[in-house]
Amino acid sequence: MKKICSGIFLMLIVILTSITTATAASSQLKVDGMTVQTDVKPEIKNNRTMVPLRVISENLGAKVHWSDGQVILTQSEMKVSLKLNSSKATVNGKTVLLDAKPYLKNGRTIVPLRFLAETFGCKVQYDHLTITIDTEPLMIKGVEVKALLHEYHMTMGGVVEQINGNAYMEEMHRIFTKNMGKKIKQPNDYTWSVHSTVIGGYYKMGQYDFLNKEGSSIARYDLYSLVQSSDKPLTGQPDVLIYDAAVDQWYEFNKTASDSIYSLMETATRNGFVTVISNTVP
């Protein structure tokens, strides 16, 4: 009789574990209300929800790279290091213990969700088959930012798209405000179209509007690029300018920072955090 009971008990454990694992594998991941698509689904290991590192970290505003057998996450002033199959991690140089070890699956690094959430100050909620991760909203002048509009023009027509995700908006705002150079006068020649701008003038690469919940602009930054000559590159002029619409002021802008904005846009687009509002390009 004891053997029969033990067998039944063991079977129940196996069934419950299978159900829990299957539920986790079919769970939908959302970050700031946006559904995140992953090629490796969440799963349960040792009663911990495990998720793919890169796609979650990127959507929480962290950059991911490998160095000396470690995966390094960087976000603003934060640096996190993890090793595969190790229960130890470092956060800004301090060692912390993980309740589940990172591992590889289908070429993806899988890590405990709660560790990522707590490290980056996020809230995690479980509701049936949905795992929701909420990050802190971006505040500008005490007003919460709900969305970021990006507009750019081509030879004919233009595109308006909305960037979602608090981490993306916060990082973009940080790049804009931290990389303004010295104040300058308004350029003599500037326009939306590179084809109607003279050599030495500036064309508008993009306009970025941070919007409140009513859809009104809280802050706006326009990036302009110098129109160069293919025969003789210009010297003595900044390659990139930024216009701060809130204070009606032009500044020199860091070229590397400008490249970072476009890299961030590519990441947000790849991860499904960019929605095209209008597209008039033929």
Image (cartoon, rainbow, N blue to C red):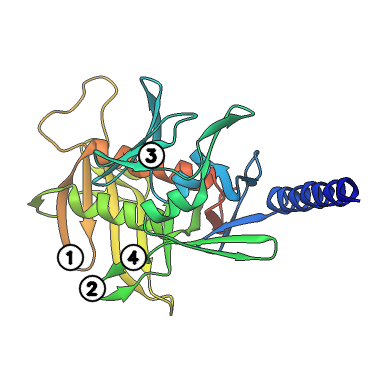
* Element on which disc 3 rests: strand
Q: Which residue is mark 1?
A: 248
Q: Which one is in front, 11 or 23?
A: 11
Q: Position of residue 29 (x, y in %)?
A: 61, 55
Question: Which mark sits nearer the N-terminus, 3 or 2?
Answer: 3
Q: CA distance from mark 3 to mark 2?
A: 27 Å
The kind of residue on which mark 4 rests is: Leu
Q: Residue sitting at 22 percent across and 68 percent down?
A: 246
Q: Which one is in front, 20 or 8?
A: 8
The kind of residue on which mark 3 rests is: Lys
Q: Is residue 190 left or right of residue 212?
A: left
Question: Which mark sits nearer the N-terminus, 1 or 2?
Answer: 2
Q: Is residue 237 above or below residue 212?
A: above
Residue 141 shows which numbered tag? 2
Question: Which mark sits nearer the N-terminus, 1 or 4?
Answer: 4
Q: Residue sitting at 21 percent across and 55 percent down?
A: 177
Q: Is residue 219 visible?
A: yes
The kind of residue on which mark 2 rests is: Lys
* Element on which disc 2 rests: loop
Q: Is residue 60 above or below residue 200?
A: below
Q: CA distance from mark 4 to mark 2?
A: 10 Å
Q: CA distance from mark 3 to mark 4?
A: 19 Å
Q: Which residue is mark 3?
A: 63
Q: CA distance from mark 1 to mark 3?
A: 33 Å
Q: Nearer the viewer, mark 3 or mark 2?
A: 3
For the residues labelled 3 and 4, say whether their Cβ atoms are less than 8 Å apart. no
Q: Is residue 215 left or right of residue 243?
A: right
Q: Which residue is mark 4?
A: 138
Q: Residue sitting at 60 percent across and 64 percent down?
A: 126
